Image (cartoon, rainbow, N blue to C red):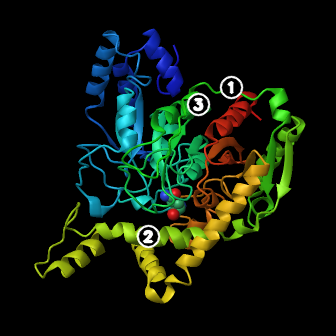
Amino acid sequence: MKDICTATLNELKAMLEEGAVTSAEVIRALKSAYQADSQQPLPLQGFIEFFDDAEELAAKADAMRKEGKAANMPLLGLPFAVKDNISMRGRLCTCCSKILEGYVAPYNATVIDRLISAGAIPIGRTNMDEFAMGSSTEYSVYGPSRNPIDRMLTPGGSSGGSAAAVAGFQVPFALGTETGGSVRLPASYCGIYGLKPTYGAISRYGVVAFGSSLDQVGLFARTVDDIGLGLAVTGGRDAHDETSADQCFNSCTKLVPYSDGELKKIRIALPVEFTKTQGLDADVSAVFEKFCAWFSAQGITVEPVSIPVLESAIAMYYVIALSEAASNLARFDGIRYGLRKDTGKGYDELYCATRSEGFGKEVKRRIITGNYVLSHHFSGDCYESALRVRNRMEKEVGEVLGQYDFIFCPTAPTPAFKLGERVDNPMAMYLSDLFTTFVNLAHIPALSVPAGTAQDGRPIGMQIVGAKFSEEKILRLAKTLEAVRV
Ligand code: GLN
């Protein structure tokens, strides 16, 4: 029998269906793996909490299976992990921030409801950069997560806990969130798959907002099929989220690799703004070239294209994301959620004391910058011009995706960096997102695929980017690549 911890979501599903294992055994095995790792001198710390009731829920799932109730529950008894900014009724949801210390979510996010209705079991909360602001998971009140490939490295961020738990074999499937690359970047650093779906593909209801016009729930797994299964269950219209789209992803549970004939008709654009960029790591460049050569050998059309607006992606992203963050985080005032520091001198003092003590350095930096950008003096100049360029981005990238099936480029300019290396250098940290933010700005989907390794063994990811709601096409190409191991 396949080892439980290294089994994929689809393999565990088959094992449960055959009766080869029980859900209780699955949860116990994952819990032991997590507990054993926590005793290590340098624990992964992907999970910040492993739920005590997971085994009990698994026993219930096993009972339901015995009673023949599995038919409409495609994930019955299967485990998943949840980034700490997604609400689960009755459980802590802290965004890894002191300001939400002790905050218990009063309701389930839609994505959680859907997974639970499908029978899946949430097994724990995962670590993240405070309020999803960061690229290394070091800005967490719980301390950093570590990369399972090399524990001196960051797993990436902000959903680094979810990525570390999946890559470290403590769970086969996990939820993350993306505002500017927070699923793809850690997926790439940890050598797993990370999907950022089209804006609106998965409901944001119950997800703590960072940059609402960019935020999206994303998925982590070790195989393409597991991502497909997760998307089929979680995606689609939700009455609680007006930006959610009426799309069905059920076909993503049966992904077929492209045939040789189909491959010959595919057209891929390679944006020169990214592939010729200064500072692109030589190993990343070599992996990229290897893929391009493989594409050409299959008869796929691969053409360099110039999309000049991509060069302003990172600047635009930070103007928009910080402005929206400053507005969204205004709700954490010490009255409604979590921490309260009442000095007895009235509301203004209470807000000030709570926010000063509750927010970490990076979050404060962003609130201050965001409010500055939005201030009367700047709003016309800065925020609105960023929105204008963003419209151009959506249009120009959309046009390229009208002529080509995919855009292909590295997920990040370098492989995972060392813990501590960029933590005091916000500019270096922000530049980790050089290749990911345009996808969020353009509201399109992208998948980071594990593509190779650097000479020292650090994983390298490439991203397949497609037009809005082309997730199935993207996953089929990824499945083709997975099968041949380019
Ligand atoms: N690393 C980027 C940032 O710090 C993206 C974060 C995210 O996608 N949540 O804003």
Q: Residue at x 48, y 35 (%)?
A: 173
Amino acid found under the numbered disc labelled 2: Glu
Residue 386, compared with residue 26, is above or below; it is: below
Packing grade of label 2 (10 A; few <14, some 14-19, many >=20) is some
Task: Give the quarter of the image for residue 276.
Answer: bottom right
Residue 37 in view (yes/no): no
**Other-residue count near label 3 (Cα within 10 Å), few / some / many at <14 / 14–19 / ≥20:** many
SS at mark 1?
Answer: loop
Residue at the farthest bottom position: 377
- Asked if the residue at label 1 sits under 8 Å from ligand 1, the reply is no
Q: Nearer the viewer, residue 213 or 121?
A: 213
Q: Is mark 2 within 8 Å of ligand 1?
A: yes
Residue positioned 82% across, 44% down in the render: 267
Q: Are marks 2 and 1 in contact (CB under 8 Å)?
A: no
Labelled disc at residue 252: 3
- Residue lying at the far left in this picture: please name it: 344
Q: Quadrant of residue 17?
A: top left
- Label 3 lies in ligand 1 vicinity (Cβ under 8 Å): no
Where's residue 459, x and y in %? 65, 45
CA separation in Å, label 2 and label 3: 38 Å
Looking at the figure, which quarter contains the C terminus? top right
Eyeballing the image, is 285 above or below 448? Answer: below
Give the amino acid at mark 3. Answer: Cys
Badge 2 vs badge 3, beta-carbon distance below 8 Å: no
**Mark with earlier residue (2, 3):** 3
Residue sitting at x 58%, y 57%: 440
| Residue 244 falls left or right of residue 260 | left
Q: Amino acid at mark 1?
A: Val
Q: Does 331 sit left or right of 378 as displayed?
A: left
Q: Which residue is mark 1?
A: 256
Residue of label 2 = 362
